[in-house]
Image: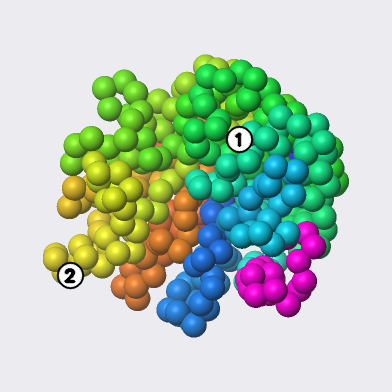
């Protein structure tokens, strides 16, 4: 299952039109990368805050190729899909959560009619019954039908499976194989250009191999674990960066060495910082940016990826990751998560802009006769 061609014919995004223009002018672009971002439901529950009323939300949505609605949907052991006990496929439209979700989806579609909108099942703290569902043919069948019903009801463009935690250990071949069976069942329930992705922590190579025949994309969480002395781990010193470019390269190399087709891989960018205390030192980029301004009178510089003991992605590091994705022929760069970008009047959505922008000329790698090179290498938005 690989629906990129079908999707591009259905909904051409601006970067695809740019590449078409390059090809018509005689250039041959090396690759292009989809720009996507997670949007957690709890950041949309109060749409009177500055993120919405100041226009940042609508501006972000307009930039992206795909918005991944992170609704904290969970499987139960039978394959049903619920939010805090409410079955999503069957819940009444007047239920507060359903009403809020529908309102958010409508707003995204108004801001960007061409954006693909998918939804997530799982995530940290929401993956407890994945192993039970994946290990049961009956539960897998019900899960597939529930996914199809949710997509049909809310007009989603696909599903992102996000199995995280200790019940998907790195070296358990049986669980990995069961995950493959689950993705196969869900894939069989999708139609047309509806997409299926699987988001995995950095070292789940067995699971990646098991699901890749049945999904359009494997998103790899190339954050929360920096590369230090040859391998990823949680930050242990004040100079470690959980989202480092070197860590991303290390993890990507391992995934490709494990046999995963680069054209089915996506890498992540973090719109937040962590210190060596792990999650206890979490701080979103917007807060870091404001504190830096208060201390120094300027916003966080584009090339700064560590400050006050915390590592994070910057404008330049995200552009470097897009460079990497283009060089390696990856499908996507994504972020966790959109609301954490800075939306101050003096520093307006710097990370989102970087995420949705083709890097500077030397990075694009076009082969072209004559003057077409300059035309196609201009700095342009992806989304």
Q: Which residue is mark 1?
A: 218
Q: Quarter-wise, where is residue 215 in the image?
A: top right
Disc 2: CA contacts within 10 A as few (<14), some (14-19) or many (>=20) = few
Query: Counting residues from the N terminus, which is met first, the one under dot 1 or under dot 2?
Result: 1
Q: Which residue is mark 2?
A: 294
As for residue 94 lying within the magenta part, the answer is: yes
Q: Quarter-wise, where is residue 238 in the image?
A: top left
Label 1 to label 2: alpha-carbon separation = 39 Å
- Horizontal and vertical percent position of residue 62: 58, 66
Quadrant assignment for the N terminus: top right
Inspect this view and state whether residue 155 appears. no
Q: Is residue 117 left or right of residue 249?
A: right
The region drawn magenta spans 88-107
Q: Is residue 262 left or right of residue 150?
A: left
Q: Is residue 331 left or right of residue 7?
A: left
Q: Is residue 197 above or below residue 229?
A: below
Quadrant assignment for the C terminus: bottom right
């Amino acid at each position: 299952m690989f629906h990129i061609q079908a999707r591009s014919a259905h909904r051409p995004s601006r970067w695809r039109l740019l590449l078409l223009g390059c090809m018509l002018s005689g250039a041959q672009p090396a690759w292009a990368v989809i720009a996507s971002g997670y949007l957690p439901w709890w950041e949309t529950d109060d749409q009177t805050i500055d993120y919405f009323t100041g226009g940042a939300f609508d501006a972000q949505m307009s930039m992206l190729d795909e918005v991944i609605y992170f609704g904290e949907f969970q499987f139960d052991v039978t394959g049903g899909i619920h939010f805090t006990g409410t079955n999503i496929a069957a819940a009444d439209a007047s239920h507060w959560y359903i009403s809020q979700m529908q309102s958010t989806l409508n707003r995204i579609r108004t801001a960007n009619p061409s954006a693909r909108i998918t939804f997530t099942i799982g995530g940290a703290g929401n993956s407890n019954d994945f192993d039970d569902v994946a290990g049961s043919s009956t539960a897998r069948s019900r899960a597939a039908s529930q996914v199809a019903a949710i997509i049909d009801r809310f007009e989603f463009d696909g599903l992102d499976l996000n199995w995280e935690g200790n019940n998907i250990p790195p070296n358990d071949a049986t669980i990995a194989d069961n995950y493959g069976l689950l993705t196969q069942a869900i894939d069989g329930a999708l139609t047309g250009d509806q997409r299926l992705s699987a988001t995995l922590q950095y070292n789940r190579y067995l699971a990646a191999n098991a699901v890749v025949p049945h999904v359009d994309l494997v998103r790899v969480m190339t954050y929360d674990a920096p590369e230090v002395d040859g391998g990823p781990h949680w930050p242990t010193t004040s100079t470690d960066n959980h989202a480092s470019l070197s860590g991303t390269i290390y993890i990507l190399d391992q995934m490709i060495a494990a046999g995963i087709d680069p054209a089915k891989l996506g890498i992540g960018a973090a719109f937040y910082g962590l210190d060596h205390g792990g999650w206890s030192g979490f701080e979103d980029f917007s807060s870091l940016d404001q504190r830096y301004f208060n201390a120094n009178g300027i916003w966080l510089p584009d090339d700064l990826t560590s400050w006050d003991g915390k590592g994070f992605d910057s404008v330049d590091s995200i552009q470097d990751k897009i460079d990497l994705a283009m060089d390696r022929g990856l499908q996507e760069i994504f972020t966790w998560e959109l609301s954490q970008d800075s939306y101050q009047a003096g520093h307006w959505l710097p990370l989102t802009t970087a995420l949705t922008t083709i890097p500077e000329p030397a990075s694009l790698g076009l082969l072209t006769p004559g003057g077409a090179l300059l035309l196609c290498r201009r700095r342009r938005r992806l989304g």
